[in-house]
Image (cartoon, helix red, strand yellow):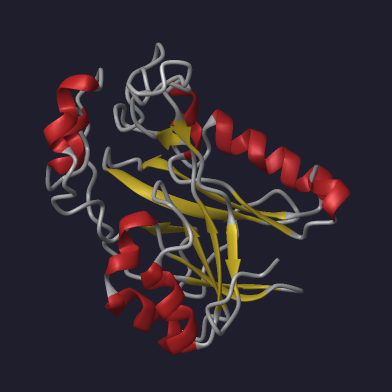
Amino acid sequence: LVQGYGADIVLLTEENFRMNTVDEQGAAKPGGWPYDGLGEKLDGPRISAVKAVAQELGIYVVVPFRMLLASGESYNAAVVVGRDGELVLSTSGVPYYQKVFPCLGYPMGSISASWPGGYAAYGDIDHGGESPLIPGQQGVQVWDLPSIGRIAIIICFDVNFMELWHQAYALGAQVVFWPSMMATPDRDAISAARLFRYHIVANGWMTYGGPADPSLPAVPARPFYSPGTVLDSTGRTVK
């Protein structure tokens, strides 16, 4: 698919490696709710698999995942894998972006009883369930990618905090990649594209859209699909 479209860079979804733990009806599969677990190290097997594919296809891949550092700290993070299959360092010399605002009081804990594994974690300040995440410590990072430009990454709930968009602008970002569990495009992202005149590439993933409508018994419980979106510097969706 990537080769067919001639893509130079691919954005995966937030917490990408844990997506397969929720089925189409929102029920937990073996392995737990996506927020459970400490995460993967930078040299872990799934990161290594992405590196191999990036090298084989000669593309960049932005990989959001739950990152486990050698110190034992767990972050919602993202890395950039280069065409050579190696992690690309940001201009400040680190290979990752750590989500600054994991999720501050996101109002979803009230439906925790219907989610195996404890959806109430979404309402906790640490947004981590059994394995608390730590807010990012290093701020927005930018990467210089030949043929792509200078990119920044912010993740999901970060979109609500204008200071991060300001940081990306101050660092000279031309394109901001926004992997998310929320629907895309988001009005805050659209506003940021217009205000700071950079492009935004967003990618959400399937979330549970609610039970079947009782007045329509033939309609099953339905998932909600959030398609990938590219916004230009005027906030318009690029077709």
Along the line of sight, the residue nearer the viewer: 209 or 30: 209
Image location of residue 49, percent across then percent down: 65, 33
Residue 199 lies in quadrant: bottom right
Question: In the rendered image of this protein, does residue 47 appear above or below residue 201?
Answer: above
Left or right position of 126 against 76 = left
Residue farthest to the top, as pictured: 30
| Residue 195 percent coordinates (x, y) | 43, 88
User: Compared to 187, does 220 lie above or below?
Assistant: above
**Residue reaching furthest front?**
215
As drawn, 207 above or below 201: above
Along the line of sight, which residue is nearer the eye, 88 or 225? 225
Examine the rendering and report whether any part of residue 111 can be seen: yes
Q: Is residue 26 left or right of residue 235?
A: left
Quadrant of image for the C terminus:
bottom right
Q: Residue sitting at 57 percent across and 47 percent down?
A: 12
Q: Is residue 40 visible?
A: no
Q: Residue 165 is drawn in which quadrant? A: bottom left
Which quarter of the figure is the N terminus placed in? Answer: top right
Residue at the image position 79 percent from the left and 47 percent from the top? 2
Residue 53 in percent (x, y) is at: 74, 40
Image point (52%, 33%), residue name: 44
Quick one: 66 or 94, which is closer to the camera? 66
> In the drawing, does residue 182 fall left or right of residue 145?
left
In this rendering, would 119 be left or right of 157? Answer: left
Q: Position of residue 4 (x, y in %)?
A: 87, 47
Residue at 35% over, 47% down: 76
Report the number of numbered marks. Answer: 0
